[in-house]
Amino acid sequence: MPQLRKYSNTLIELTITGIVAAIFLILKLWYRNTSTDDLQFLLSPINKIISLFTGAHSNYKPQEGYYFKDLDIIIDKSCSGFNFFLISFVMISFLIIPRCHRPLLKTSTLLASIIIAYTLTLFTNSSRIIVSIFTNQITPLSWNHYYPIIHESIGVIVYLSCLVFFYLLLDKITPKNLAREKSF
């Protein structure tokens, strides 16, 4: 009987891993054909956060994005943080789901991973954009030709730092064996 339970858990583990991989691939393929309008679920909250922190207001231009006239920036598809969302979802799923030993808990953790990744993406991407805005304001005009490199570097540093920090935090606060007692 223990052998059957171990086989069952392995099968469930592989199924959940396959589901996570399928979600990742489907969303990645979907993203290739999206427009700014399709990414409103990320761009609209980020627009509100940026407005709140900078005091600047934007106008939405269909197919282009949110234009902040005072800051002379546009938040579009490339600023959505969608790839970070996917990476966060996969990281959270692969970190927590193997620690769950009940099928129902694994499934609910999969759903929770999407919500947590979404929240983390809004926080991280908004932080990245705000840091870029303020960096642009303090960067000397003589460095303007370096700004694309500075902008990308800020993205790499903020995204990677948040991903590593959140991984370490989640690893620390999540018990190694969730609901170990009985499997369904």
Image (cartoon, rainbow, N blue to C red):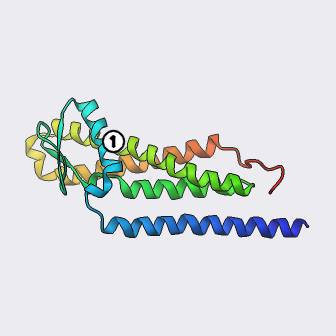
- Which of the 4 image quarters holds residue 33? bottom left
Q: What amino acid does circle 1 point to?
A: Pro
Pick whichever, 127 or 36, lies toward us: 36
- Residue at 28% over, 31% down: 52
> In the picture provided, is 75 more to the left or to the right than 140?
right
Q: Which residue is mark 1?
A: 45
Q: Is residue 19 left or right of residue 183?
A: left
Q: Residue at x 28, y 52 (%)?
A: 79
Choose top left, top right, bottom left or bottom right for residue 149.
bottom left
Q: Residue furthest right?
A: 1
User: Which residue corresponds to the image point at 53% horizontal and 56% vertical from the top-left?
Assistant: 91
Q: Give percent across and percent down for residue 3.
A: 87, 69
Asked whether 41 or 18 is in front, the reply is 41
Q: Nearer the viewer, residue 106 or 169?
A: 106
Circle 1 residues within 10 Å: few <14, some 14–19, many ≥20: some
Q: Position of residue 46 (x, y in %)?
A: 31, 42
At x 85%, y 69%, the residue is 4
Quadrant of the image containing the C terminus: bottom right
* 126 up-or-down from 12: above or below: above
Q: Is residue 152 above or below residue 33?
A: above
How far from the left and from the top, in percent, is residue 181? 83, 49
Position of residue 75 relative to residue 4, above or below, is: above
How many numbered discs sit on the rendered protein?
1
Q: Secondary structure at mark 1?
A: helix
State the quadrant of the N terminus: bottom right
